Amino acid sequence: MSAAELTHDATTHAVLTVLGGTPLAHAAATAGMSSAELAEAVETYHQAGQAALATRIDSDWYQLALELPPDHLEETLTSSLAPQLRQLTTTGAITGWWFLRKTPGLRLRITPADSASTIDPLLNELRTTGALTTWRRGLYEPEQAAFGGPTAMSLAHELFAADSHHLTTYLHDPHPSLGRRELSLLLCSSLFRAAGQEWFECGDIWHRVSRTRPAPPPLTHPEQLTHQLHTLLTHDPHPTGPLFGPDGPLHTYAPWAHAFAHTGHALAHTHPLQRGLRDILAHHVLFHWNRLGLNTTTQSILAHTATTAILDTEQSPPPTLRNNTE
């Protein structure tokens, strides 16, 4: 059955009735259809909706490849590019932006796709001043399969944008409250725990991250680092908890933690996901670490040590680890 065949009013009504919770057999009998016919119609409707959503995701964003002098990449990003993108977002000229690091510069993604007339002058100005070496437009192909499907990809885009905003603000601060590696582990914990992942399940996610990176180099004091990460990972990362809450030492970063927690919670309640939840969460870590600017060696050390800190130590898990929900 093609999507066009679903235009028949009775069939469409029957499909919507099933999607609203009516038993398939009852809806089919009411519409004068067989259960098999209605089941096929429901599946066609579902596939058409997925295809429409995927097309929208593909067309909503466009990509810009920016080449920057490597020694000034973060300075240009945080002092020139990000502030102007925030201003364009405030005025409504664009509705979202995010970036990834990609040698020899950045991959910048912008929405809506028809905002080029606003963005092009900004990039040309940066090129004139020497902050930007060159730039070119490209095709953005979202990794929908890796992030769990169209709905999960939309959630990913929301987190990418929030992470890019908060990260560039953080990098512009000469005296942050916490180092980027430590803060990153807490943000990732917020993501995991809001998705309902318990202590050893979080260890499994870190193991999945570690499998994407080479074995770390030998460390001088691996036990000390494992103990430090174990302590860090036992903290409550809830956006309103003792660390990120109003009276906490990291309260400045509460909106950042909330963005991660919101995504984790939403993913855990998205059905169906087209990939396992823990694989999706691990993939989010990799994208976050790319934006953060952690090199492969640092990523490997953190992922492998976090895995060990949870799964391979004699230290007991904390007696109470609240599964964050919203």
Image (tube, rainbow, N blue to C red):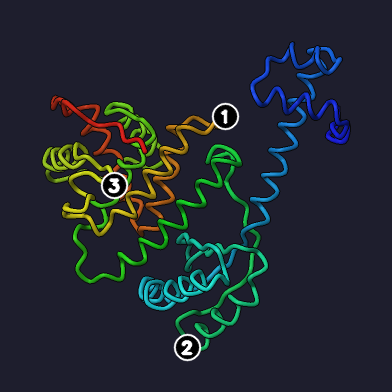
CA distance for labels 1 and 3: 27 Å
Q: Amino acid at mark 2?
A: Thr
Q: Position of residue 200 (x, y in %)?
A: 28, 26
Residue 195 occupies quadrant: top left
Quadrant where the C terminus lies? Answer: top left
Q: Nearer the viewer, residue 169 or 135?
A: 169
Residue 204's place in the image compared with 122, above or below, is: above
SS class of the residue under badge 1? loop
Q: Position of residue 224 (x, y in %)?
A: 11, 41
Residue where numbered disc 1 is placed: 272
Residue where numbered disc 2 is placed: 129
Does label 1 or label 3 sit earlier along the sequence?
A: 3
Q: Amino acid at mark 1?
A: Pro
SS class of the residue under badge 3? loop
Lateral position of residue 310 relative to residue 63, left or right: left
Q: Nearer the viewer, residue 59 or 35?
A: 35
Closest to the camera, between mark 1 and mark 3, is 3
Q: Amino acid at mark 3?
A: Pro
Residue 117's place in the image compared with 10, above or below, is: below
Residue where numbered disc 3 is placed: 239
Does label 2 or label 1 sit earlier along the sequence?
A: 2
Lateral position of residue 35 relative to residue 173, left or right: right
CA distance for labels 2 and 1: 48 Å
